[in-house]
Image (cartoon, helix red, strand yellow):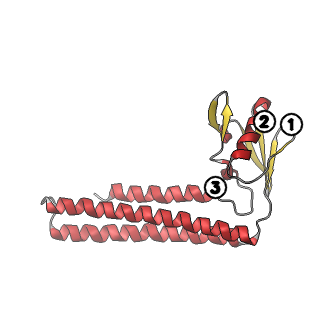
Amino acid sequence: MLEQYEEKMGKSLENLRTEFTSIRAGRANPHVLDNIMVEYYGTPTPLQQVGNITVPEARSLLITPWEASILKDIEKAIMVSDVGITPNNDGKSIRLTFPELTEDRRKELAKDVKKKSENCKVAIRNIRRDANDDFKKQNKNGDISDDELKDIEDKIQKLTDKYIKQTDDMTDSKTKEIMTV
């Protein structure tokens, strides 16, 4: 009965985890490029599918396209994205060098992490509300008794608490990663 709601809460948490991977914390992480689409033969294509992305040093990424002809398209896609780094094109590959984060930038990223975390918690609480509404309707229709409803509401609350705690733990971990110099 509760599986579908637990699955939805799990998806909310997974979505948060994905969003956190795109927030860089001073080290080069290929996941910051996950949302970049490159115009490839007239079709928007994820950057990972048109080239090889490597991490040659702690604060740089190297993008080597499968075809040299799309180098300019990759460069343009990075420029218009929200990565905030200017690509260096050497004619064969593109290098992205991540600057050391300033304290202000770290605080800004920490706020962003907190905001994404709050959005995840709101989503989890909305799922709890939907679940409670659903079971209250079943109770009203006579499908489940008052005692069963009370028991289910307790289980839903425990589920919600579990996922909120996981969200908080992920947020604390990411914030600590960002604030560590």
* Between discs 1 and 2, the one toward the N terminus: 2
Q: Residue furthest right?
A: 90
Residue type for callout 1: Gly
Which numbered dot is residue 22?
A: 3
The x, y position of residue 108, in whole percent, is 66, 68
The x, y position of residue 86, in whole percent, is 79, 50
The x, y position of residue 33, in whole percent, is 68, 48
Relative to 3, is 27 on the left or the right? right
Q: CA distance from mark 3 to mark 1?
A: 27 Å
Dots 1 and 2: beta carbons under 8 Å? yes
Residue at horizontal 74%, vertical 46%? 79
Q: Mark 2 packing: few (<14 Cα in 10 Å), some, or many (20+)? A: many
Q: Please give the residue where the numbered disc 1 appears in the rendered image.
A: 91
Residue type for callout 2: Leu
The answer to which of 41 and 59 lies nearer the viewer is 41
Residue at horizontal 15%, vertical 62%? 140
Which numbered dot is residue 100?
A: none
Q: Please give the residue where the numbered disc 2 appears in the rendered image.
A: 71
The answer to which of 32 and 73 lies nearer the viewer is 73
Q: CA distance from mark 3 to mark 2?
A: 23 Å
The x, y position of residue 146, in whole percent, is 16, 69
Number of marks in picture? 3
Q: Mark 3 packing: few (<14 Cα in 10 Å), some, or many (20+)? A: some
Question: Can the viewer see residue 181 in this picture?
Answer: no
* Between discs 3 and 1, the one toward the N terminus: 3
Residue at horizontal 44%, vertical 65%? 122
